[in-house]
Image: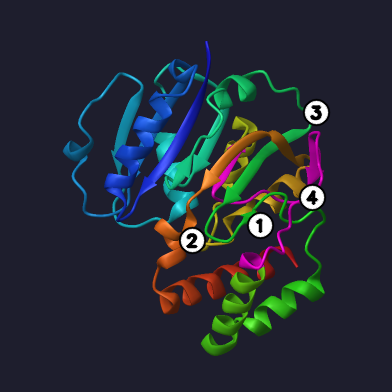
Amino acid sequence: MEMILNIVVCFNNKKEIMDYIKKLERIEFSDKLVICVVINDDTNIEYFGKKNENIFVYKCKGNSGYLNGALYGYKSMEGKGYTWKWVIISNTDIDYPDNQFIKKLLGGKYPENAWAIGPDIYCPFTGEHQNPRYMRRISKKRMKIYLLVYSNVMSAFLYHMLSTLKKRRGKSNKKDIKVVTQVYLIHGAYMILTEALIGQLMVNPFKGLMYHEEQHIAEIVYKNNKKCFFDPALKIVHNEHSSTGKSNFIEKYKQMKHSYLVNYRMYY
């Protein structure tokens, strides 16, 4: 039987994960969903207990980051006897306003070359719709601008603040898209991926710790002549301010700068 695997990473958010699991259990067709929790901090496995047979918990040796931590979870699930229709890698600060989200995903009609699907992600903190983010591939010139912005912490902080203000003043990137549409990349807060793509990510690991994993994924898709798609029928709410949105900016800056450099050197 084809199932959906939802992998989440535990890093200073164990209570939020428990709340997220409860939300998933209230959605229709939740019996088609398997949840994999990957512990990247000092949380004990016993904290999560064994709520039901469709929840699995694994512990990494140290902090392997968001994407690589999720891939550790995927590999740990091998041999469990499941066939995955989709593998979701997501944040846990997520709400499901549509109780039929899983049903719609299972019944979704996507092109054969679809390797990644991004839902309509609404962020109440900024008023922004975080997908679609980039319709076309990021140019080399634009990547150089990002590298310049993140060359020092002050310019990065100013850019971050101005970007947040722009979003909160209603300059949302929401486009009037009513059908499944090809995009360059999907937002990293909620990524719906095929097993074929996961296989490529396993042999082409992300060399950053966190931030901009979605660009790495988009480039793997691009290199394999496959596509990313935005599906406006799939709707979630991303309460970003409750997790990484409030993280220490200096540490966030260091990680973002490193990830930009990693992606630039690998793909441009």
Labels 2 and 4 touching (C-beta < 8 A): no
- The numbered dot on residue 215 is 1
Q: Is residue 68 above or below residue 2?
A: below
Residue density around tag 2, few if under 14, some if 14–19, many if 20 or more, within 10 Å:
some
Residue annotated with mark 3? 111
Q: Main secondary structure of the magenta part?
A: loop
Which of the 4 image quarters holds residue 142? bottom right
Q: Secondary structure at mark 2?
A: loop
Residue annotated with mark 4? 175
- The numbered dot on residue 267 is none
- The numbered dot on residue 210 is 2
The amino acid type, in three-letter code, at marker 1 is: Gln
**Residue stretch rendered in magenta on the structure:** 167-192
What is the spatial separation of the Cα atoms under label 3 and label 2, in whole angstroms? 30 Å
Q: Earlier in the sequence, mark 4 or mark 1?
A: 4
The amino acid type, in three-letter code, at marker 4 is: Lys
Percent position (x, y) of residue 163? Answer: 64, 73
The amino acid type, in three-letter code, at marker 2 is: Met
Left or right: residue 232 compared with residue 38: right
Q: Earlier in the sequence, mark 3 or mark 2?
A: 3
Q: Is label 4 or label 1 in front?
A: 4
